[in-house]
């Protein structure tokens, strides 16, 4: 463990991510989408369908920026997103429907 000490700032402690713990927490978090939340709604409801879709298609990520001096988390996130940007069919369909409605 290391500490970051900078003029006119509080002592900073970097975040350490344990992959084993993260994977366990991720599994529990995604399990809750269905076991705790989706069961509150009728199985055929739009709410239950949305929660099932989130469970089946979303990813949980952790991003750690420990470069206290030169770090730029927003720029880093934009680079990552641009590299892995998936095709979002829902957004494409909604955009197409909006365009059709506007015409």
Image (tube, rainbow, N blue to C red):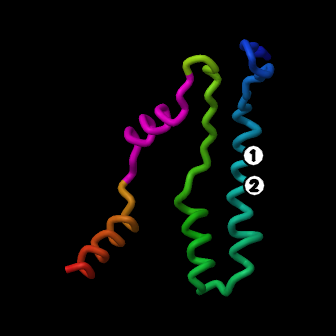
Residue at the farthest front position: 8
Main SS type for the magenta part? helix
Q: Which residues are magenta?
A: 71-86
Residue 6 location in percent, x, y? Answer: 72, 13
The structure residue drawn at horizontal position 31% and vertical position 75%, both measured from the top left corner, is 98
Which residue does the numbered mark 1 point to in the structure image? Answer: 24
The crowding category of the residue bearing disc 2, from other C-alpha atoms within 10 Å (few below 14, some 14 to 19, many at least 20), is: few
The structure residue drawn at horizontal position 78% and vertical position 15%, both measured from the top left corner, is 3
**For the N terminus, which image quadrant?**
top right
Specify the quadrant of the image occupied by residue 56: bottom right
Which residue does the numbered mark 2 point to in the structure image? Answer: 28
Front-most of 84 and 72? 72
User: What SS does tag 1 mark?
Assistant: helix
Q: Is residue 78 magenta?
A: yes
Viewed as shown, does residue 82 lie left or right of 103?
right
Specify the quadrant of the image occupied by residue 8: top right
Callout 2–callout 1 Cβ contact below 8 Å: yes
Front-most of 91 and 29? 91
Residue 81 location in percent, x, y? Answer: 44, 42
Front-most of 47 and 66? 66
């Amino acid at each position: 463990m290391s500490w970051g000490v900078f003029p006119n700032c509080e002592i900073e402690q970097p975040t350490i991510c344990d992959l084993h713990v993260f994977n366990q927490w991720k599994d529990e978090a995604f399990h809750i989408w269905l076991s705790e939340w989706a069961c509150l709604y009728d199985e055929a409801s739009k709410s239950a369908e949305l929660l099932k879709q989130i469970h089946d298609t979303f990813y949980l990520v952790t991003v750690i920026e420990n470069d206290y001096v030169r770090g730029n988390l927003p720029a880093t996130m934009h680079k990552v997103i641009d590299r892995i940007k998936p095709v979002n069919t829902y957004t494409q369909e909604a955009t197409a429907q909006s365009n059709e409605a506007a015409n």
